[in-house]
Amino acid sequence: MDKPTPSNPEPDNTDSYNAGSKQPEQEPLRLQLHPISWLFIIFEMVKNFFVPILLALLAGGSDSYEFIGAVFVLPAIVFAIVQYAVYRYQLQPGEIVIREGVLFKNVRHVQYRRIQNLNLTRNPLHRLLGVAQLELESASGGKPEAVMRVLSMAAVTEIRQKIEQAKQTAMTELESGIAQAEESKVTEPVILSLSILELIKAGLISNKGMVVVAFAFGILGQTRTLDRFFDRLEVWLEPILPQVDWGMAHPLSVVILIFLGLISFVVFIRVLSIIFMLVTYFGFTLKHKGQSLFMQYGLLTQTQATVPKQRIQMLSVAESPLHRLFDRIAIRAATAGGNVNQHQQKNAARWIAPLIAKQRAQWFIGQIQPQWDLHVQQWQGVAWRGWRRIFRRDLFILSGAVLALWFPVQLWALLVYGLVPISWLHARRSVKAMRYGFSQNTLVYRSGWLMRQQSYIPIDKIQSLQRKDGPFDRFNNMATIVVDVAGLDLNRHTVMIRFLESEQADQLLDELYQRVSKTDFVWR
């Protein structure tokens, strides 16, 4: 859609997403969301309240539908209509201006050249109606500057063009003239693409079906489906093990049913994980797009996301026993401000490599961040005696489990202590796997022996350093060094080097401080 200018005062035809009247020619048009955006807002709210609504249906009486309508549906409809009515945006020459709010009005000015990510999400209903949800993220990270649901594809195209034009204008003459012209002629090579076979492997490796399985078991329990399943299981097992009392009074029956339940649980998880990976990451491709990484994937809900390379603060490599079985790894990127907003994390696709061959890891990271030096000069381990602290903690947990099981199964609860040798091995192997080292410009931290994690943190991305020593640390004359990186997701692999001798912690802190002080902090 072209906006009128003083040199072109004639009226301009607007697309369907322009719901307002034409403003004077010196003022840009005030645009609304797509007329059906209120419908998607209702769907989003209902989805967020799905569990309470389902519980109300399962546990409520005959008036459940009236209760759901009064508490969930009607407020959602009112909120959606009001949000659609008050939301406006203007495409200014150098910025987009967004106005929203009823009681508390909010006006945001977002310069096009400051927009780092433009994430596009389209589920089947979006594609059917020719619309999309758009997220604009600036260099500040955290909450997106704008979540625009829903826009027509014509509006999305216009906003994308405004952003690209602003970035081209901000480039130097060489970059905008020669390099940009050459770039337009060459198709950017794909760094990573995932075939259906690779997605099946990713589903077998991951545990993405865990939440779905837990929710499904809750529903089955509410509808007494699980009771009927166990009744049929008892009828099937009774001829095989006639000496066992299947009235759940015999401890052996409890053990057998738990064992069979665990097997069913694992199989169910893997099946759902495969379905999840196929639906979520179908057609996954990652490639360069200027100074950013461009990802697109999705079977039902199609997602396009960009991650500027300069905003990548850390790369973390995950490797589980199943990864090693398939000779694969997964690589995750933490970006500036990435841990501030959970919604942004969910939609910004931080897994830049959900699955990749292990032998391609060094090459892949070199493609993402060629300036990072990944060669560790010398590895340093933590205090070996730290394994005793892990072992004592595990013994405490096992003892609690024995007490919890004592009343239902009595002496059979002591079988839990059969896990003590495994706990002893786990503690020793865990501490042995903890190590850290430096390359010329990167701190590398490794942990885990079953679930291995290795993180690469550039020295110029380190924001702060902290030495922590809790009561147990002081009692054991130990300390922990915490490396704070902007954008670090604290719910995942944190850069927290534990079980250091006090003197070793001081030495590490001094070395990190000296290295950081010699570099300039780089946020973007």
Image (cartoon, rainbow, N blue to C red):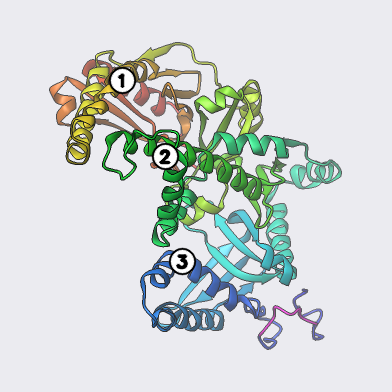
- Crowdedness of circle 2 by 10 Å Cα count: few (<14), some, many (20+)? few
- Crowdedness of circle 3 by 10 Å Cα count: few (<14), some, many (20+)? few
Against 506, residue 16 (above or below) is: below
Depth check: 416 or 15 in front? 416
- Crowdedness of circle 1 by 10 Å Cα count: few (<14), some, many (20+)? many
Span shown in magenta: 13-19
Tag 1, which secondary structure?
Answer: helix
Q: Is residue 341 visible?
A: no
Tag 2, which secondary structure?
Answer: loop
Q: Which residue is mark 1?
A: 427
Q: Residue at coordinates 58% horizontally, 60% vertically from top-left?
A: 136
Q: Which residue is mark 2?
A: 238
Q: Which mark is residue 50?
A: 3
Query: Magenta includes 17?
Result: yes
Against 37, residue 47 (above or below) is: above
In the rendered structure, the answer to whether residue 477 lies left or right of residue 487 reads left
Q: Residue at coordinates 78% horizontally, 40% vertically from top-left?
A: 188
The tag earlier along the polypeptide, 2 or 3, is: 3
Against 270, residue 436 (above or below) is: above
Type of residue at label 3? Phe
Q: Residue at coordinates 48% horizontally, 12% vertically from top-left?
A: 377
Type of residue at label 2? Glu
Q: Residue at coordinates 54% horizontally, 64% vertically from top-left?
A: 146
